[in-house]
Image: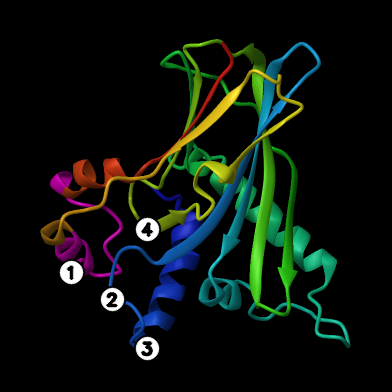
Amino acid sequence: MMSKKIYAGLLLVVAQWLSLSVAQAHPHIYIEGGVSLVFNSQGQVTSLRQSWLFDELFSTYALQGMTRDQSGQVARAELEKITSEWMTSLAEPESHFFTKITLAGKPLTLGAPNHAQTTWDPKTSQLVLSFEVPIDPPVKVDAKGLEVDIQDPSYFVAFDYKGGARAIKGIDAPAQCKFGYMPPRPLDPKTERLLWSIPPTQKELPENLREAVRQLSHQFTVKCP
């Protein structure tokens, strides 16, 4: 479920989309992502880094009213403000960065995010949010493996990892570690039509659709036998 703060902003984006006849219903925001697992010198995973490239329409909305310099670049203070707001909202239990990490099937405890920043590329008019979430305590990965699942259960946000298995990287990972990626299973045409028929003001998905979109999780794995 998206947090109330994020929803307030997203609904305005939806209104803009509808006025442009670009989209009708779920999803409303598109993110191209990248993930990195950070290892320490003992071969333990210490944190997860993520990079989210927002679609142009949402980026344009998010930058409305922000101060820019003579070259058109967004002021650093403005980007720091939006970063702080987003990270506060994403840290709430309902969303929690749309991320779940398990080791041998057991959920891991994630610490408070750090190294968060938002950048803007004037050439593409897109925002990029990057951040790091510590794994507390660090964990050793064996043949049973560690899994990272990323998705928005409300399907208000759709993620895409165009690099597939290359979208996940291991920073200082032991040489024997193997990384993998399992993309979401495609929705059937009937479910897609139902999702597209939901009005943008409806925040909650019906139970049958909540069950259907659970298959849209992006699953990244690492095994270090």
- What quarter of the picture does the C terminus occupy? top right
Q: Position of residue 75 (x, y in %)?
A: 83, 72
Q: CA distance from mark 1 to mark 2?
A: 7 Å
Whether 104 is drawn above or below 25: the answer is: above
* Amino acid type, residue under disc 1 in the picture: Ser
- Was residue 108 drawn as part of the magenta stretch in this picture? no
Tell me the tag on residue 197. Answer: 1
At label 3, counting other C-alpha atoms closer than 10 Å, the crowd grade (few under 14, some 14-19, many 20 or more) is: few
* Pointer 2 residue: 24
Q: Position of residue 114 (x, y in %)?
A: 74, 38
Q: Mark 1 or mark 3: which comes first in sequence?
A: 3
Q: CA distance from mark 4 to mark 2?
A: 12 Å
Q: Quadrant of residue 83?
A: bottom right
Q: Is residue 182 left or right of residue 211?
A: right
Q: Is residue 8 left or right of residue 44?
A: left
* Amino acid type, residue under disc 4 in the picture: Phe
Q: CA distance from mark 3 to mark 2?
A: 10 Å
* Residue range (magenta): 192-208
Q: Residue at 30% across / 57% down in the picture?
A: 203
* Amino acid type, residue under disc 3 in the picture: Ser
* Pointer 4 residue: 156
Q: Mark 3 or mark 2: which comes first in sequence?
A: 3
Give the mark count.
4
Q: Position of residue 38 (x, y in %)?
A: 71, 29
